[in-house]
Image (tube, rainbow, N blue to C red):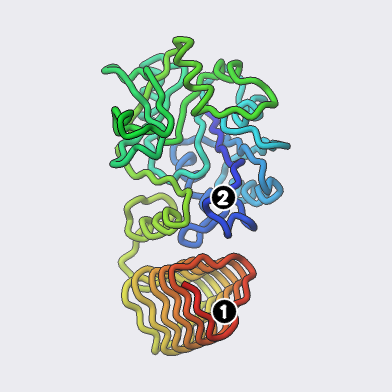
Amino acid sequence: MKALLLLGGYGTRLRPFTITTPKALLPLVNIPFISYQLELLRSYQIKEVVLGVGYKGEEFKKIIDIGKNMGLKLYLSYEKKPLGTAGGIKNAEKFLKGKEPFFVFNGDILANFNLEKILNFHKEKNAYITIGMVKVSNPSSYGLIITDDDMKITKFIEKPTQEQVLTDTINAGVYVFQPEVLGEIPSGKEVSVEKETFPLLVEKGKDMYGYVHYGYWLDVGTLEKYKKANFDLIDGKVSLLYKKSQDKIEKKENTYIAEEVSIEGKLIVDKNVIIEEKVNTKGKVIIGENSIIGKNCFIEDSIIFKNVIIEENSIIKNSIIGNSVFIKNNSYIVNAAIGDKSFITEFSKIY
């Protein structure tokens, strides 16, 4: 069986980091986001994966290597212009056509879907399309899916008003398609599967069903949700590649942590990192490879990417620091998102 990952979006809500790095390659606990999605597929013996890419498509060659190292066979389906979710699926038709159903995943979802149960449900219902759904406490900012007692989909409501909120089930961003669905999508056009293709197929009377996922699910589409994804992994709320540990400090090879460092909470350090004397960390702190934290720094509930230098006496709280950032001494950075290759002068205050 094959799967398609839709990775062609610009990731605008995750800027400044997606200006230089595709969303799929942003780190979650120092592991590329895409690796978690590929691990889920591999765990269900799905070995052939199509990557629907557009924006910064050349960067996705790195994912081919990640996939090879995981024993997967990956294909790139490149969009010369933005085609939307349905257009991206149609663009990958040459990799997906055949007799077998295939999975489709939105590229910004972190979840522990039970793909075996979803596929079995799809086959039992003899469905044309099965849409994975989740229940959320505030569905008004999502697209609602209305089903009957047999879980057959009867209606879609995009971005409903409060009066239109008839259910708490929304699109979870995982689908099972029969290959015939590809013939319903026009070629070379920007088309939304959620707003155009799905409602049209319901009108045509196609058998579309919803399967409710009750496990972990997160749309990693904003900076706050991105931070939450990292911290949820640390807390063990979802277990895919990163496994929760009881150790206060997790470190990789060639790392130096001075004896006078104080850890209150959890510190996760990648390889080739130096943490100097009297550094104090609180809450959840993740530090990427080849980074240096100077003396007397205080870091709380923050994610630091790779190749970062933070000089002495600096304070970083509730922030995300991008790749190759240089923060001079005595800086104060709170509730901030610092993009790649930024230079922060000494005694700066950013909050």
Circle 2 SS class:
helix
Circle 1 SS class:
strand
Eyeballing the image, is 219 above or below 203? Answer: below
On screen, residue 245 versus residue 302, left or right, reads left
Residue at x 34% of width, y 23% of height? 146
The residues tagged by marks 2 and 1 sit, at their Cα atoms, a distance apart of 25 Å
Q: Which mark is residue 327?
A: 1
Q: Nearer the viewer, residue 44 or 95?
A: 95
Spot occupied by residue 136 in the image (x, y as percentages of width and height): 31, 40
Q: Nearer the viewer, residue 307 or 10?
A: 10
Spot occupied by residue 114 in the image (x, y as percentages of width and height): 37, 36
Where residue 263 sits, quadrant-wise, is bottom left
Eyeballing the image, is 333 above or below 32? Answer: below
Spot occupied by residue 207 in the image (x, y as percentages of width and height): 42, 14
Front position among marks 2 and 1? 2
Spot occupied by residue 156 in the image (x, y as percentages of width and height): 41, 24
Label 2 crowd bin: few (<14), some (14–19), many (20+), radius 10 Å = few
- Amino acid type assigned to the residue bearing label 1 in the image: Ile
Residue at x 41% of width, y 14% of height? 126
Eyeballing the image, is 4 above or below 226? Answer: above
On screen, residue 148 versus residue 260, left or right, reads left
Eyeballing the image, is 159 above or below 180? Answer: below
Residue at x 38% of width, y 42% of height? 112
Label 1 crowd bin: few (<14), some (14–19), many (20+), radius 10 Å = many
- Amino acid type assigned to the residue bearing label 2 in the image: Thr
Query: Residue extending furthest top?
Result: 205
Residue at x 67% of width, y 25% of height? 94
Q: Which mark is residue 12?
A: 2
User: Are discs 2 and 1 less than 8 Å apart at CB?
Assistant: no
Looking at marks 2 and 1 on the same chain, the residue that comes earlier in the sequence is marked by: 2
Q: Which mark is residue 314?
A: none
Where residue 26 sits, quadrant-wise, is bottom right
